[in-house]
Image (cartoon, rainbow, N blue to C red):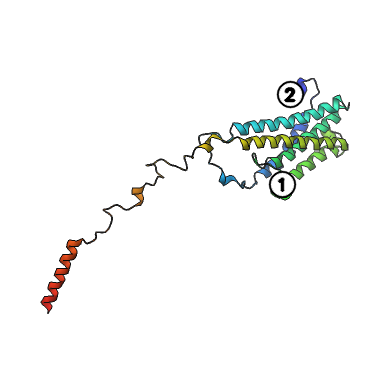
């Protein structure tokens, strides 16, 4: 929105379109991501330093790059429709509406892991690994399609039907965004956090702490060991036993 308005273009999306997308389109995939299983390599990673932020600098930069990618791709489609194809503002808005929110639905599958590649998983794991996400994305796509094609309903949001060429633009935007996301994940995997170079504090607690176990606390002390008879006691016992036997005889 900011780039389009500052560049002299009409606003790509009106307030009602943004409200409809935020309430109806974005919520189902976002809720479905909460049901995502733990990543397979989670237990092979070093523990996170509790003194550092949950979302570090690398992940913050990755999230900003992904958001800019979706926004610039939708603005590029909007400007392409107005400048090169000479379409109306309503037609350009409808195509930009489809690009930004269908790409967001595809991005929800890319967000199942912020560091592992989506392309390394098979088609079954890619789409059926989280059936809730598949169902939520289907509802979001249906909401976008209904907002564009249902007569009367699309007029409320100022949208018009788009042709097949517009959907090709949507697919191109998804592929370009996937490439950007995969490059970002590759960079995250290449750069190791500083905490992985040193053993974690959880793995080597300081001695004397509440969870420390030293040798003295494990092995019993000499005072706690049962007294064993020494040689002197054994000899005296033997002599006493012999004397008693002689008395009986």
Task: List the residue tagged with mark 1.
Answer: 126
Residue 242 in which image quadrant: bottom left
Where on the picture, by quarter, is residue 30? top right
Q: Secondary structure at mark 1?
A: helix
Residue 190 showing in the rendered view: yes
Image quarter (top left, top right, bottom left or bottom right) of the N terminus: top right
Q: Picture coordinates of residue 111 (x, y %)?
A: 68, 40
60 in relation to 136, above or below: above
The residue under the point 79% across, 28% down is: 76
**Front one among 188 and 21:** 188
Disc 1 to disc 2: CB gap under 8 Å: no
Of label 1 and label 2, which has the lower sequence position?
A: 2
- Residue at left offset 52%, top offset 37%: 197
> Where residue 82 sits: x, y (%)?
85, 26
Number of numbered callouts drawn: 2
Nearest the viewer among 16 and 160 is: 160
Mark 2 lies on residue? 2
How many C-alpha atoms fall within 10 Å of the one at disc 2: few (<14), some, or many (≥20)? Answer: few
């Amino acid at each position: 929105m900011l780039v389009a308005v500052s560049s002299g273009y009409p606003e790509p999306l009106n307030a009602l379109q943004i409200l409809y997308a935020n309430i109806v389109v974005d919520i189902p995939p976002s809720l479905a991501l909460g049901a995502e299983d733990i990543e397979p390599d989670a237990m092979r990673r070093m523990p996170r330093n509790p003194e550092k932020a949950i979302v570090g600098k690398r992940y913050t930069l990755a999230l900003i790059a992904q958001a800019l990618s979706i926004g610039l791709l939708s603005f590029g489609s909007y400007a392409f429709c107005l400048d090169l194809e000479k379409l109306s503002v309503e037609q350009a808005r409808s195509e930009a509406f489809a690009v930004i929110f269908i790409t967001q639905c595809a991005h929800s599958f890319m967000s199942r892991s912020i560091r592992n590649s989506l392309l390394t998983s098979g088609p079954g794991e890619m789409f059926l690994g989280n059936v809730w996400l598949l169902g939520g994305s289907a509802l979001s796509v249906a909401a976008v399609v209904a907002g564009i094609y249902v007569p009367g309903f699309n007029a409320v949001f100022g949208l018009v039907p788009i042709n097949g060429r517009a959907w090709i633009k949507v697919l191109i935007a998804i592929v370009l965004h996937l490439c950007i996301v995969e490059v970002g994940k590759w960079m995250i995997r290449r750069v190791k956090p500083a905490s992985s170079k040193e053993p974690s504090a959880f793995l080597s607690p300081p001695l004397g702490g509440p969870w420390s176990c030293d040798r003295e606390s494990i092995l019993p002390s000499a005072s706690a060991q049962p007294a064993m008879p020494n040689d002197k006691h054994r000899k005296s016992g033997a002599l006493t036993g012999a004397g008693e036997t002689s008395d009986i005889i």
